[in-house]
Every structure is written in structure tokens, then in C-alpha cells.
Amino acid sequence: MIEEILNTIKQHENYKGQIVKIYELNGVDYKRCEVPSFIDERVRKALERLGIFSLYTHQVEAIEALKNGFNVILTSSTASGKTLAFNIPVLDALYRNKKATALYLYPTKALAQDQLEKLKLFSEFPIGTYDGDTPQDERIYLRNKGRIIIANPDILHVGLLPNHLLFGRFLSNLKFIVIDEAHYYSGVLGSHFAMVMRRLRRILSYYGSFPQFFLSSATLENPEEFSFKLVGEHFKWIKGPALSPFKKLFVIFNPAIVNETLNIRKSTLSEAIWIVETLLNQGKNVIVFEKSRKGVEILSKQLKERIGNTFEISPYRAGYTVTLRREIEKRIKSGQVRCVVSTNALELGIDIGELDATVIVGYPGTLSSLFQQSGRSGRVKESITFFIVSSNPLDQYFTKDPEYLFSNKFESISIDLDNPYIIKPHLACAAYEVPLSPDIDSEYFGNYFGNGVKELESNGTIVKKSEHFFLNSKTSIASQFSLRSTGEEHIRLIDMETGKTIEKMSKKRALEEAFPSAVYLHLTETYVVKKMDLENGVIYLKKEQTDFYTDALAIETIWIEKTIREKQLRHINVYFGEVVVEEVIRGFVKKQFFTDRKIETCPLDLPKIEFKTKAMWFTIEDSIVNKIKSVEDLPGSIHALEHALVGMLPIIVQCDRKDIGGVSHPKHPDTNLTSIFLYDGVEGGIGITEKAFERVEDLLNITFKSISSCPCKEGCPSCIYSPKCGNENKPLSKNGSILLLKEILS
Ligand SMILES: [Zn+2]
Ligand SMILES: [Zn+2]
């Protein structure tokens, strides 16, 4: 029985009452029904061969919606059979129409490979993965004969779209486009992906081909809006079960306090070790999720040292070779590996068999990740999940309001369809693929299209010939930019020992992350920046073992360029718009790995960075400001509130805390009022603060709960401290921020 584990944990010598809450999730009943009669006999036979005689109702709903001509987005829990919901209709179409083809898109090569294995089980059609590893003859075969091509967004961007003429047969007959793990496409990648979809759709219309889309996703907020933004077409949402069919205990575990006054807790890693050990001793097979690659290595090393003689323990992460990963997956599946410690690399679909317990070390960043990770155990029987929270505000929030986890609130996914830095290069790509026609293409590319074309024409990237715009080059520019970053990547990071470029990045990112003496992490190795030569666009690094990392201390100034949306919310006016941010990196802090203890602060003298982005800001009525001033320090109060808002925003919008910046001002020159700004840290914006604008009331309420229920006296890392504050967390007034929120929300 799974409950016995809890007793053993509670009797352990390390147990000091860390369990905050135990949720008993009773398995939901997945209703079954027959395979729809309209499905081709050959598909039904193939299913029967695999022992499948009935389907879940959500699978059938999705199949029927597709049959009725809808684009479909299916959201449901892990292991709820999302794959069959699209494989069945796709194969059905392929059997009925000898020419029909389908395109599957996966965010990683490993997932594409996994899907290929599944498809091979019940079809004899020419199918293959098309990515950077595919040999030339296999590529030619797939282009000429392939019925299903499984690809990733990057190869679509640089390989398939610019060379669409080679894929003429495939594209003309395309009936379905499947985008699996669609929730993965948020932020920068999501905004680029949306543009790639528009390029794909306009090429398809050139071939007279109008396929249906199928998106499968973890549970998320507002799937219809998300799918519309991502693809540019309307979708029907099929809502599958959000929970597993088997019973699960979900335990929220807050590390023991070691220093009461400063509200400092034991590290998540040290708590994880004894929990994992207890689970293994109880005969359970365990999967542990750690956020960073380095954390994975350290945790598995420590576990191996302690109990490696008794149990086989293995780390797993991106960066390992494909062969090694396949090998580990096999050993987990066979039960040989009793404990695997992984980054989120094992969070998505790959089949690793039956596991009994999940240990999640630190909040993985989104609720859907949290549930996906938890869902990696208990696919066929009851299971237990330990969610060990870290000390940052977001993690601690779940100990104060644990119900939130199961309240069916999910993050919005941010996608920006108006970021000029992202759209412009895609317009140039599109002009190469099929010449741009303003009246047709403005429909695909939206608001920015007209200005984008003007700019590209004036700098000579595209040229106009009889009403159409052509790329002024014989080759596509697609390979010149990546879908995983914005802006131009002029700066090269060079390993001094090998002379090789290990990474390229924008000047902004270089100044923020690879400043002189910075510790830069690349493929789990630590490098130290030895020389920065911005004029020639190079930064030299040397591989060095360090037990600390570095955080830049940035001071920002912000100006409003244009207000796009505004609204009033009780005592504040809320705005969304375009801003210019000026950032000066005035120094950096060295912090010890894992404990995050500050070692020292060092000054820097670097050129300032100026960039355009989007922001959400609000101004506070003078009457409230005067009230605060009479009892608390105003700059400290708004500064504390700004930090807390940045810390809590990722609960509302799927994003990383480091992609958001904040500025507070007692009297901002552009508004003439006390103002707090939150801005997208990526040039041009990626939709984060636009969502924050829409859900500002939720954000303020959650932030109020977070600060006011924190047990500290004057502020701590769990409420109002920010690890990257350019003023090193001064001045801050916890009481002032609570009072301010009370007034705003009253
Ligand atoms: Zn606190
Ligand atoms: Zn600050």
C-alpha cells in the first residue's frame, strides 16, 4: 500500500514535519466506447492486432471532430492516449486516399524517434523522421515516397520550407498536420513557431492544399486562444481527463527550517536524498526530476555514493548521446535501473515503462510540467509523488495556498505576433519561398506586415517587381537565425583552449551573462570569461571548475514609447504598450552553487544596453501614495511590490523569471505618478506582459497572498527578495508592500 510509505517517511530521523499537505487523488474513470464504425477496416484490424478493441471517449470525440472538418486541440493528462487520437484518423485517411500524406511535428528529435516506433507498430506506409541526422538517401526517399514525415520546427524552418519545391508531391497531398506537445511552444520559440506556421500555410495554399491541424497538449489555460495564435486558424477544443486513472498520493514537502529569523531552509537536494533512499528501500522504482543538468549530475552522484551498491541509479539529460539515452531508457523500462534522476528531458512522451514514485525537486516552472512529471509514475498502478519546494516565492506560494495546484487554474502561454525582431526575418524567408503579395500576405502576418515590408525593402533585403516582393538573394536566409532566440547573434563565445566557438548570442545577452569574470555554463561545464572584445564581437572563455556562479547586477531605466491598451482597476490605471529599456550592468555577485549563498559583490564598467520591448505598467492614485508615505517608506514599498510581482508572474503566464524585468518609480517622468513596470526581457517582447495586463487582478491577488502569508519579519527570498536585483535588495519594505496591495485591491 502506498500509504505505508508516508508512515515510514514520518518515522524517519530526518522528518521534522516537512509535509505541508497530502492530496489523495482518486483515479478518474476513463470512459470507453467502440472504435467508430467509419474508421477503415484496415486500421481496426491493426488496432486489434495490438490488443485495442475499444477507445477512450475523449479519443473518439477528437476523431469525430476531425471527421467533421474541425481543427482539433486535445488537452489531457499524460498516458491518456493522445497519440491514438491522431494516429487513427491519420492512418484512416492514408488508407482511403492512396496519395494522402501527413506531417508530424515534435519539439525534440528524441520524441520524433519515439513516435516513429509507435507508428511502425501498426502501419506499413513509408514513414520516417526528417531531421539533421537523416541520411541523404533516406531524405530523398521520404521526399519522393513518404506518406508521413516526422520533423521538428527547426528542420521545417531551414530545410523543408525554403526547399518546398522538392516536397511538391508531399505538400500537395497533405491532409493532416499534427503538432504534438504543443504547450512546449511558448515565449521566443512559440513566437517563432507561429511565424513558421504562417509560412507553411501560405506555401500550402500555393499548392492548393488545406490540411487539418491536430494539436495535442498538456492542460493549459484557454486552449482555443492559444491554438489560434500558434497556427492562425480556429480550433475545436476537446477536453480530455486531467488526471490519471489510478490512485495517486501527491505530497507537498517544504524543507526543514534551519534559521528561523532569516527564514532559511534546508536545501531541496539534501531532502531529496533521504526521501529517494526511503522509497527505494520500500521496493519502489523512482524517477527524480531536477531542473538543472548540473543538479542532475550532483544528485545522482550523491545517491550513487550512498546507496549505489544496493540499487542501480542513473542520471538522464539532454547532452548525452542518443545511443546512451536509448540504453538508459531500456534499463529503466526493464526495471534494472531502480532510480533515474532526470532533467525535464524525460517529462515529455518517451515510454519508460512502469514507475511507482516521482520526486520533483523544486517547482519545474509550470503547472503542466509539474503534472506531467508527476504523471511519469503511476501509468498502470497507484503511485506517490513528492513535490519538494525550494525557497523562492513561487515555490513557497504552493505551501501557503496548496489548493491552487488543483484549482484547475493554468498558466497562459505567451506568444507575441507583433514582435518586429521575430517577424522581419520570417518575412524575408517567406519572400524567398513564395514572393510576397501585400493583399494576400497581410492576412497571414498581421499588424506588422506593412511596416515590415517597408523596412525590408528600404534596406534592400527584398525587392519589388510587378506588385510582388522577392528576396534579394539566391539562397534563403533561414539558416542565418535560430527559432530559439531573437535579435542578431553577433557575439561569439570562444573557448581559449580549443579556439572553437561554443555559442553565439546577442550583445544584450552577452553583456548580461558573459561579462568579464562571469561564470558561464555550457553543457554542464563551467567556463570563466577572460576577455570581452565587443568591437570585434568575440568573448574568450576558459574551462575552469568553480563552486560558484555569477549573477549580473543591472540597473534599469524605462521610457514609454506607445500605449497600446489601458484599463482601470479600482485605484490603479493599468497599461500595456511599447517601451525602451536602458540597462547598465554595474557589477555582479558571486554565489555558491546550490546554497545560493552570496560570496562577494564585484563592480563592472560596461557599455549600456538599450532595447525596445513591451511592458505592462500601472500608476497608483496620489491619495493611496500619500497614505503609504505617512506610515512607510514609499520607494521601499513599491520596490518590494515590484520584486514580488516579478516573482509571482510565472504562475499566471508560462515564462521564466529571468525573462521578465521590473522597474518601480515614486514619480515616473512619463506618467507623473507613482508607477510600477513589468517588461518582457526579450527584445521586441514575447507576449508575457501582455498576458500580465489581461490577468493583472489575479496577479495582484496572488502576490498579496504570497507576501502577507510569509512568516518572515522584514522580507526574505520567499517573498520580496529578488536574486537579480541591481540594488542588492535595498530599499525594501515588506509592510509597505502589503499595505499598498490592500489599498489597491480594496
Ligand atoms: Zn518572507
Ligand atoms: Zn530591485
Image: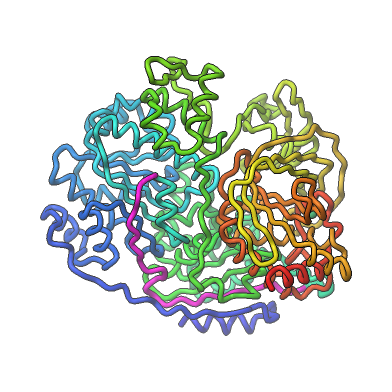
Ligand 2, seen in the image, is in the quarter at bottom right
Q: Is residue 18 left or right of residue 345?
A: right
Please tell me which residue is depicted at 23% across the width and 51% down the height of the picture.
Answer: 69
Q: Is residue 490 left or right of residue 630?
A: left
**Which residues are drawn in magenta?**
232-257
Q: Residue 696: image x %, image y %?
A: 61, 61
> In the image shown, does 705 or 138 lie closer to the viewer?
705
Q: Residue 548: image x %, image y %?
A: 77, 49
Tell me how many marks there are: 0
Q: Quadrant of the C terminus?
A: bottom right
Q: Is residue 363 left or right of residue 83?
A: right
> In the image shown, does 568 or 271 lie closer to the viewer?
568
> In the image shown, does 491 or 293 lie closer to the viewer?
491
Is 85 situated above or below 418? Answer: below
The answer to whether residue 242 of the structure is visible from this angle is yes
Please tell me which residue is depicted at 84% across the width and 41% down the height of the picture.
Answer: 586
| Residue 133 sits inside the magenta stretch | no
The answer to whether residue 312 of the structure is visible from this angle is no
